[in-house]
Image: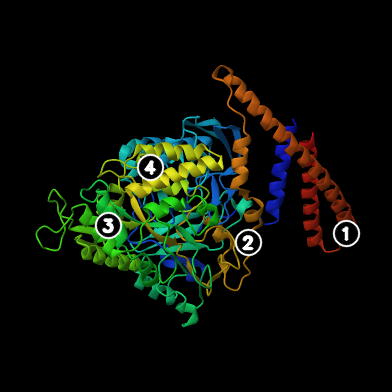
Amino acid sequence: MEKHAFSAILCAIILSASLLGLNLPSPSKVSGQEIPREDTLIVSDAWGPPAGWNPMLPNTAWGTELMYPALFFYSTRDDVWIPYLAEGYKWVNKYTLEITIRPQAKWWDGTPITAEDVVFTFELGKKYVIGWLSPFWDYLDSVTAVDERTVRFATSEEKLNYFQLVGLLHGVMILPKHRWAPIEKEYGQGIVSEFRDDDPAKIIGAGPYRLLTWTEDMWYYERVDDWWGRDIFGLPGPKYIAHKTFKDNVAAANGFEAGEVDACGHFFAKIYEMWEVKGLPIRTYYLNPPYYIGSGIIHLYINYAKYPLSDINVRRAIAYAIPYDALVSKAYFNYSVRSAPVPILHTIPGYAKWIDQDLIEQYGFEYDLEKAKQILDDANITDRDGDGVREMPDGTKLGTFTISVPYGWTDWMMMCNMIATNLQEIGIDCVTEFPDFTVWWDRLIKGQFDLMESWDGGMGFDHPWNSFRFVMDPRLTGPVGKDYPAGNWERYTNWEVTSLIDTIAKETDPTKLKEAYSELQEIFLRDLPAIPMFYGASWYEFRNDRWVGWPTEENPGWASPYMWNYPDNLPMFFHIVKAGETPTVPAWITEMQIPTSEILAGAAAAPEPLPEQLAPLEEIRSDITTLSENVDALSTKVDDLSTSMQEISSAISNLSTNLAGLTNLTTLIYALIVLQIITLIVAAAALMKK
């Protein structure tokens, strides 16, 4: 009876609100030709035409992640989390993480987002190779739906890896099962390679932006003003976000200076001259050197599946032939520094503590061409026929090899030329090649290359564990010719590494962690699966003439600001507004933050799982914990409700007094409607309290 009465009251409230002219937002009908520039934030970050908007493709179009929610946002810069699709989390035990989905969450077609969507998405990563998803299954036993809004991620003592169990909270785009299940049935394995999903009308997402229109060099996303998160997160500033593709960095710089785009994620030579010399309304995160926030380590990947590049003497000679400091100063304009010879960020004390300096002194390398030649001579790798190219003892020539980066990456292109010149100097025949990004990326993930310059796992709450894993873990790779986008592109295989990586992920004792990291460093320096060169800058440039509120050192806002880091960087768009307006960081960005330390502390305090024969009691224990939390929350709500009712009662009394003095009929009608709404709210609140 009370339930029906409450429904009737709710209907009356909605009806009364409609009398006041309140309407739900409707989708925009703006066509691609009519999109107003003043409402559009134009970004340039990716290269080449869009590969498609299917999130499972090895290379998806920029902005795909704007359409699909992750469970959480994560800030690399601040090491904090914000619940996005998730309402909250709970450690059921040390090996089971439970996530509750927000009740408001819906796909654009109105279908509720459920635990089944989450399970379906993760199962796709189990069945097919999806770079940002499949590796989690090395550390998961199951992903199950407890009820419509609750999903559990379970691992075991053998597979336990807190980096991965927590890491799956962000970066995984949840897909709607009701749309993708039929597509999977139609395409099978081809769902991760053949299906482009390039018809905007057919895409069903749940983010605050949807694909509107696209061409080979420009595509637009339109804000979804009635998206499910509006009452929680609000709306991002730009009505439209577009991506513009340029031929290369030079063309991008010219377009940026001319105001064709508002923000970029490209390398620009002497970026500081844009404001210091040319006086343009342009900035980067830092006003002074190094201008950009650092990220992961840039390596030279040398294919381990190709002889003679797999020979350790050849690899060590190459390591000594790289002009590290010159790469940074001449090609990189001092936007970075040379990295340590192991994949650990030595510029950040929290990471540098893991570096084993004794191993660095014993096995490290510096730029020294004479040393490089001596290594080859000592290994009997000499120029036997006088053509300037050395041969292995079995007669195999050192080259011709190709060192490659995407065309348009002018800084890296210059670096490749510098490295190739030095390799020629020591007797290794090497040339450069600069294909389109899509071609370069395809060769990289298939292991069909000689030498390539590229990134690693980056920095974050899991560094340096993830950097070692990214470069060395054999579980991330496989046969040459098959796609393995998640890392270990050089096809290095050493199962001793796997054991150490897994040990670190379970260990909390600093002394034991130091020992394990030292063992990994010794293997890395011994085998040289890749050669760390310098720290990559997080390219991030913006203009202040059309849009303001960008994150800077003075105005940190949210996240590590680089334009490609979505959906983690989505909150940034919520504090960007048109020039002339006052930007503010939404309260939820600070109020909802959860430190990584808090999440991991919860894991450490979680109980051990019950023995198998007592497994049914696990649910009871979990239910008791949930009940206790709900009772605490209910107590708070009752107190808040009591306060609200007192305030409403006072407001009604004041309104009644004011009504006595009203003479204007229109004002009286509106006042009576407002009074009716307040009275109905009080009645509804009373029923809820019962």
> CB of mark 4 within 8 Å of CB of mark 3?
no
Identify the mark nearer the N-term, 1 or 3: 3
Q: CA distance from mark 4 to mark 1?
A: 74 Å
Q: CA distance from mark 4 to mark 3?
A: 24 Å
Identify the mark nearer the N-term, 4 or 1: 4
Which mark is drawn over residue 452? none
Instruction: Name the residue tied to disc 1.
Output: 658
Q: Residues within 10 Å of mark 2 (few under 14, many from 20)?
A: some
Which mark is drawn over residue 473? 4
Instruction: Name the residue tied to disc 3.
Output: 317
- Residue 253 location (% of width, % of height): 39, 73
Q: CA distance from mark 1 to mark 3?
A: 88 Å
- Numbered disc in front, either 1 or 3: 3
Q: CA distance from mark 2 to mark 3?
A: 51 Å
Which of the pair 111/457 is nearer the observer? 457
**Total labels drawn:** 4
Picture layout, residue 478 above or below residue 674: above
Type of amino acid under label 2: Val
- Numbered disc in front, either 4 or 1: 4
Identify the mark nearer the N-term, 2 or 4: 4
- Residue 388 location (% of width, % of height): 14, 63
Type of amino acid under label 1: Asn
- Residue 234 location (% of width, % of height): 61, 55
Instruction: Classify residue 153 as left or right of residue 10.
Output: left
Type of amino acid under label 3: Ala
Picture layout, residue 208 above or below residue 685: below
| Residue 443 appears in the figure | yes
